[in-house]
Image (cartoon, rainbow, N blue to C red):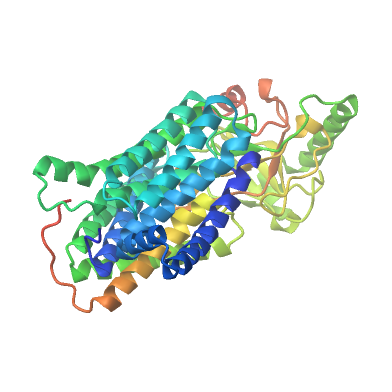
Amino acid sequence: MYDIATDHASALGAAIVLLAFGLVFLRLLRVLARRQAGWAWRFLAGFDAASPMAKLAAALMLVSGAVHLALVPGHDGITGLLFIIDGLGFIALALGAFTTTWWRRPAALWLSTTIVAYLVWVIAGWEAPDQVGIACKLIELIALGLVMRLKNPSRAGWPRRLWRATAFPLLVSLTTLGIWIGGLVHPDALHAHAGAVLQPVASVATPEERTAAARLLADTKASLRRYQDPAAAVSAGYKPGPVSDADPLLHFQNQANSHAVLDPNRPQALVYARTPVGLKLVGAMYQMPRVGQWGPDPGGPLTQWHQHEGICFSPFGFEFSLETPFWTCPVGSGSITTPPMLHVWIIDNGKSGPFAAELDKAARRQLTGRSSP
Amino acid sequence: MNQMTATESRVEIAGVLVVLQASLSLVAGLSAIPFGIVEPGFRVLSLVTILVAAMMFWLARNLRRGRRWAWRWLVLVEVLSLTVTVLLTLLPIGTIRGPVPLLANLVIPWAVLVLLASGSSRSADPRPGPADPA
């Protein structure tokens, strides 16, 4: 569900380069300190005296600062300006961790403000949540958690202790929720529905593509005539998948066809609807062998493949739920991404059309007598 | 400037990471509840996840207090978590795709294990510490 935006990829490299640069910088400081450079000696004294916790918090703020500065070229206007301020602020606070005694409170404030600002931007739709942004928030949350634990709490009263115990988990939860809301409220053009990512295609089909799409539909219909009876499908090597109460569709898969590519005579799966009067063949599902390997789309935008990402699959009952933006699933389920697939519906699929990622709601209701969950 | 020893600091870092993991688990458990309406299995899984998250909050609190049993349970939980993630990563199902799953599901559990191991080797007999403010 969350990819790495093209203009954000460089930020990952910048973070790694900055950490390497930081190590070289420390070595240089030691050389300068040995040559009696007072400022280098003072910085190193602060660095050596700092706890591993303060050092880690500073390193994480440096990484966040580097990521923000590396993202400036891809962001115009106020967002770009804020990234410059944010990046420089993080770097200054990271250095301040070894040269000042008052850096913790500004650091906590800076980290919290940055996280909240990101949520505002994402929920407002001014920034699409992607893996670089989410990873950066994860790093900032860890840094914030460390900074909050650095202060000596021995003299704190119970309200402050309660705040210290609940503030961090609360912020982590709200951050997750905020990114989720932003992603779901403002899906990009390649998200058909939560968890399904569409193949990038041109916006308009050419006459040749329309003809090719019509041919694929006709060939699939002709091929599927022999499988109207599920028994015929089973004798041809198709095996029914697990039944889920949440899904009225039942996929019969044939592993022998797993390496065929968009072959109407050898579809990877047959899709049956569980109707009140038994199984009814409603379509075929073509699937590519590997994750991320988009299939040929003879119909251009008409035959757009999709793959399911960001879903938690539980083998207990063959059930699905959605992953959180931080890629976590409930215990007993695991994150999966399916290889790209293309459905061809041989029944009237309403406005969605014969190659839609999902069976149209009206068609589903008509077949099964109930609406989709 | 150095308000805590290196060992105490490592335990504190591990504690922060475990609280982060617990918070992420809590959200994962809560977010599965709506799916439980139509998928009965997820009713159980969401409840189990919320209980695991609560247990991790409690373990983090007791780790900071220097409880040896909390250290043992956390090692067990993290080893289990890492093992499952590594096994899922070996399957061609796209479990780890990008920096976020790498950080959340591999780097953080591994870092907690390293911190717990280093905290243990440097402090052979962790004593019950002062009352944890959390």
Q: In the rendering, at what x and y percent does residue A336 appear?
A: 55, 51
| Left-right relation of A190 to A122 | right
**Could one spot residue B84 in this view of the protein?**
yes
Q: Nearer the viewer, residue B99 or A192?
A: B99
Q: Is residue B48 above or below residue A185?
A: below
Q: In the rendering, at what x and y percent does residue A233 appear?
A: 70, 48
Q: Nearer the viewer, residue B60 or A286?
A: B60
Residue under the point 54% across and 50% down: A242
Q: In the rendering, at what x and y percent does residue A250 appear?
A: 59, 42
Q: Is residue B27 above or below residue A235?
A: above
Q: In the rendering, at what x and y percent does residue A264 appear?
A: 81, 43
Q: Nearer the viewer, residue A141 or A184?
A: A141
Q: Is residue A129 above or below residue A203?
A: below
| Left-right relation of A215 to A280 | right
Find the residue positioned furthest to the right.
Answer: A208
Q: How many marks?
A: 0
Residue under the point 60% across and 42% down: A8
Q: Nearer the viewer, residue B62 or B43?
A: B62
Residue under the point 38% across and 69% down: B114
Q: Quadrant of the N terminus of chain A?
A: top right
| Left-right relation of A115 to A269 | left
**Could one spot residue A318 in this view of the protein?**
no
Give residue B13's quadrant in the image: bottom left
